[in-house]
Amino acid sequence: MHKKITSPLCWIPSVYFAMGLPFVVLNMVSVLMFRRMDISDTQIAFWTSLIMLPWTLKPLWSPFLGMFRTKKFFVVLTQITTGIAFGLVALSLQLPSFFAVAVALLFIIAFSGATHDIATDGVYMTELSETKQAKYIGWQGAFYNLAKVVATGGLVYMAGFLMGRIGNVYAWMVIMAACGTLMLLLGVYHSKALPSGGQAAGKVHSFRDTLDNLWEVLRTFFTKKHIVWYIAFIILYRFAEGFVMKIVPLFLNAPVEKQGLGLSEEQIGLYYGTFGAMAFVAGSLLAGYYISARGLKKTLFSLCCAFNIPFVVYLLLAIYQPADGWLISGAIIFEYFGYGFGFVGLTLFMMQQVSPGKYQMAHYAFATGIMNLGVMLPGMMSGWISTWLGYKYFFVFVLVATIPAFLATYFVPFTNEDNPSRNRQG
C-alpha cells in the first residue's frame, strides 16, 4: 500500500549525515563539554580518545553481522540505540559521578556508531552499481562533512549561547538531548526510506564459517607485499594530528593567562566548526583534481607537506595570542584547508595500494582501523603532554612529531602504479 522510496538521494544524504554526527560529537564536541564541567585536559584527551577504539576494531566484528538480519536492520537499530544513549548522556550530566557515567555511555555510542558505519557502507555498496557509487560519492562525503559543520559549528555555537542563559550543565544537557532526538528521528525515517541492502553476508552461514572467513581476511591482509611499510605509513601520516586533534579546541577555549586564546564556544563553533569544516571540504575537492592530473605517486609527498606543515599556525597563535577574530579564523581556515587537501592522499593510498585484492572492502576497513589507531594513541597522550609542556611548547613538540610522517611518505613503496589519465576518465 505504501510506495517505497527508491531514489538514492532519498537516503544517501541522511544516512551519511547520521554516520558523521556521533563520530564528530564524541571526537570533538565532547571535549568542549567536559572542559566546561571542570575536567582536566589530561583526563579529557585520554578518555575521549580511548572511547574512539570501536572505530579501530570494527573490522573484527563486521563479518558477524552477516549472521543476522539485513544491513538496513543494523542501520536503523544503531541509530535508535545511539539516540537513546545520547539522551542518557544528557541525564547523566547532573549526577555526582557524571564523568564516569557519561564516558561509559559515549563508549556505547562509539560501538553503535562503528557498527552503523559497517552496515551503512554495506547498503551503499550492495544497492548501487559501481557507476552509481561513483555518481553519488560526492553526496556521501558532503553530508558526512555537513554533520561536522552541524556538530562542531552549530551545536557548539548553541551551547555557548545557552550557557550564558541557563548555565553550563543545562546547556550541554540540551545539546546532548538534541543529538539524541535527531538520531531517533533519522532512525524512524530510515526504517521507511532505506533499502534493505540484502543480507549482510554472502556465503557465511555459521559461526565457524565466519571465524574462518575473518582469519582468511586477516591472513591475506598481513601477508600483502610491503605491508609493514604500509602500516607504518598509515600510522605515521596522521601521527602529529593525533596530538593536535584533542588539544586545539581546549587551547582555543583556555583563558589567555593560561596560554590559551580565550575564545567563547560561539567563536569556536564559528571559526573552528564552520569555517574550518568548509575549508576542509574545499581542500579535499581541489586535492582530487590535483591528484587526478599528476597521479598519486608524484603528489603524495606534497600532500603530506600540505597536511602537516600548517600545524605551525597553532604554535604562532600560542606565541602571539592574538585577539583579532579574523586572524585566528584565518589561521584555522589555512590549517583545515591543508588538512583536507592532504587527507585525500592517505585515503587514496589506502584504496589504491593497500586494499586491492580479493577482500578489497575488508582490507580497506582494516586500513582505516589502523589509521584510527594511529590517531587514537597520540590523542590519549596529548592531554598529559600539553599539561606538562604548556600549549606553546606542546605545539613545538607537534611540529617535531611531523618528521616521521615526512620520512615515511618519502620512502613508502608503491605496489600498484597509478595512472593519472585513467583517474581523469574515472
Image: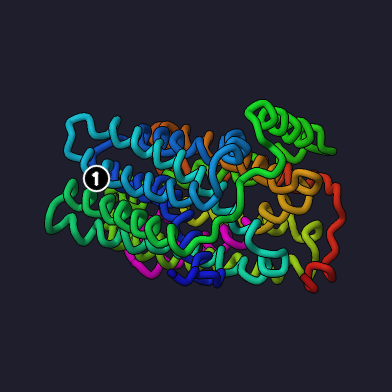
Residue annotated with mark 1: 90
> Residue at (24%, 45%) from the top-left corner?
90
Residue 217 visible to the viewer: yes
Q: Residue furthest front?
A: 1
Nearest to the observer: residue 235 or residue 190? 190
Q: Is 66 left or right of 260, judged from the image as shown?
A: right
> Residue at (77%, 59%) from the top-left corner?
296
Q: Reply yes or no: does residue 337 show up in magenta.
A: yes
Where, quadrant-wise, is the C terminus in this rendering? bottom right
> Residue at (47%, 39%) from the top-left corner?
52
Find the magenta span and give its range.
316-343
Majority secondary structure in the magenta region:
helix
Q: Residue furthest top?
A: 208
Total tally of numbered discs in the picture: 1
Q: Amino acid at mark 1?
A: Ala
Residue 397 visible to the viewer: no
Nearest to the observer: residue 70 or residue 174? 70
Where, quadrant-wise, is the N terminus in this rendering? bottom left
> Residue at (28%, 32%) from the top-left corner?
101
Residue 188 against residue 142 in the figure, above or below: above
Query: How far across and down, in percent of the image, does residue 394 sit?
Result: 46, 40
Q: Is 355 left or right of 62, judged from the image as shown?
A: right
Q: Reply yes or no: does residue 153 show up in magenta.
A: no
Nearest to the observer: residue 222 or residue 81? 81
Residue 244 against residue 328 in the figure, above or below: above
